[in-house]
Amino acid sequence: TRRYSDFDWLRKTLVKLFPGVYVPPTPHKKVGPRRLDEDYIQKRMTYLNHFLNAVILNENFKACDALICFLSYTQRDQFEQKMKEYTSMQPISYLEDMRNIDGKVILTTDESNQKYFANIEKYFNFQTQILKKVGYNIKCFQNNLRDASKNLTCLSKNFELLFFLNNRVMMKDSITKTYEELQQFCDNWGKIFEKQLDAVQVHFKEFFKLLRLEGESFQELVGKRSFYENKYKSEFQRISLKKDRLFTARDISKFEIAPSTNYDANRMLTDKEYAFSIMCSKENSLLDQLEKFVQYYNKMSLTQLKTLVKSHCDRFFYNFKEFDVKYYPSINDGIITWTNMETFLQTVAANMKKK
C-alpha cells in the first residue's frame, strides 16, 4: 500500500539520483474536499499507474535501490526509514558520481545547442499553454454530451407517454409503433453518448492531460540544463573580471595559484591569456565542472527527448486506434448507431405516411 506522497517521494528521489535522465510525471497534488471523491481517486490512480509502469520500463531505474524498496517493503516503518535516508541525501554535484546505464558520461559541445534548447523550451512552454486550453474545451464538450444525454432521456420519457396515450385511445398501430420506436431510439442514442463520454474521458481528456504533464516534466530537465548554463555564464563573467583586476595589479602573490603549479613568472605578467589559465585555480576548477555539467545535460536532453518522442508516437497510434473502436459503438451491441439511423428514419417516415 502506497500513498500519493510516497509516489511523490519516489519521483523526487529518482530526479536526485539520476540527473539528466527524464523522470515521468506524477499528478499534481490536490487540496480541498474533492481529493476524496471516488472519481478523482480513480483518475489519480490511473496517472500514478502510468508513472510506475514508465519508471519500471526505464533501463536506468531498474536496479535503483529506492525503486526496489518502494515496490518490496511491506512494513511501513522500514519504508519510512528508507525514505528519510534518501531525502537527506545531497544532490549529485560531480560528474564522477553520475549514474548511467552504460557507465559512461558523454559531453556535447556543439555551439548550435544553445539555440536548439532555447527553441525546445519555447516549444514545451507553448505546448503546456495550448494543452491547458484543450483540457478546458474537452471538459466543455463532456458537459455538452451529458446535457444531450439528459435531454434524450427526457425525450424518451415523453415518447413513452405518447405511446401509452395513443395505445389507450386505440390509435392506429403504425402511430403507436412509431412512438415506441422513437422511445427506443432515444434510449439507444443516450447509451451511445454514455459510451462516448467514457471514450472521451480516457482517450482525450486523460490522454492529453498526461501529455501536458510529461511536457512539464521534460521542461524540468531542460530547465536544469539552462540553470547550469546560466550559472556557468555568470561565474565565467565574475571570474574573468576578478582575473582582469588581479592581472592589472600585477601582484603574483595574489593570483591565487595552486601551490604545486609550475609557471613562468615573467610570462605571467605579460601574457594575459597564459596568466588567466593559471590564476584562481580553485575557481577555474569550479568553472570547468560547470561547463562539463552543461555539456552533459546537452547530450542527455537530446537523448531523452528522442526517447520521449518515440514513446509519444507509439502511444498516439495505440490511443486513437482504441478511441476509434470505443467512440463508435458497434451495431452488435444492440444500439442504433449513426450507420443505421437513416434506415430507422425511413421506417418512421413510412409509418407517418400511412397515417
Image (cartoon, rainbow, N blue to C red):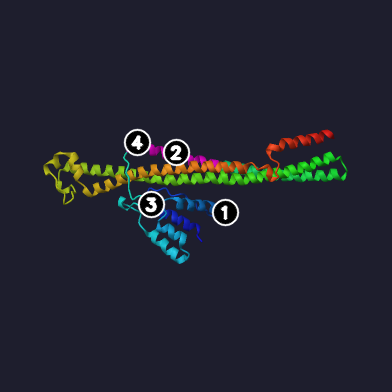
Judging by the rendered image, the residue that carries numbered circle 1 is: 42
Asked whether the residues under the numbered discs 3 and 4 touch, taking CB atoms below 8 Å apart as contact, a structural biologist would say no
Q: Reply yes or no: does residue 117 show up in magenta.
A: yes
Judging by the rendered image, the residue that carries numbered circle 3 is: 18
Question: Helix, strand or loop at disc 2?
Answer: helix
Magenta part of the chain: 110-134
Q: Identify the mark at residue 123; answer none if there is no mark.
A: 2
Judging by the rendered image, the residue that carries numbered circle 4 is: 112
- Looking at marks 3 and 4 on the same chain, the residue that comes earlier in the sequence is marked by 3
Question: Helix, strand or loop at disc 1?
Answer: helix
Q: Is residue 46 above or below residue 348?
A: below
- Looking at marks 1 and 2 on the same chain, the residue that comes earlier in the sequence is marked by 1
- Looking at marks 3 and 2 on the same chain, the residue that comes earlier in the sequence is marked by 3
**Observer able to see residue 149:** no
In the image, what residue type sits under mark 4? Ser
Point out residue 140 in the picture as x, y percentages from the top left corner. Answer: 60, 42
Point out residue 194 in the picture as x, y percentages from the top left corner. Answer: 66, 46
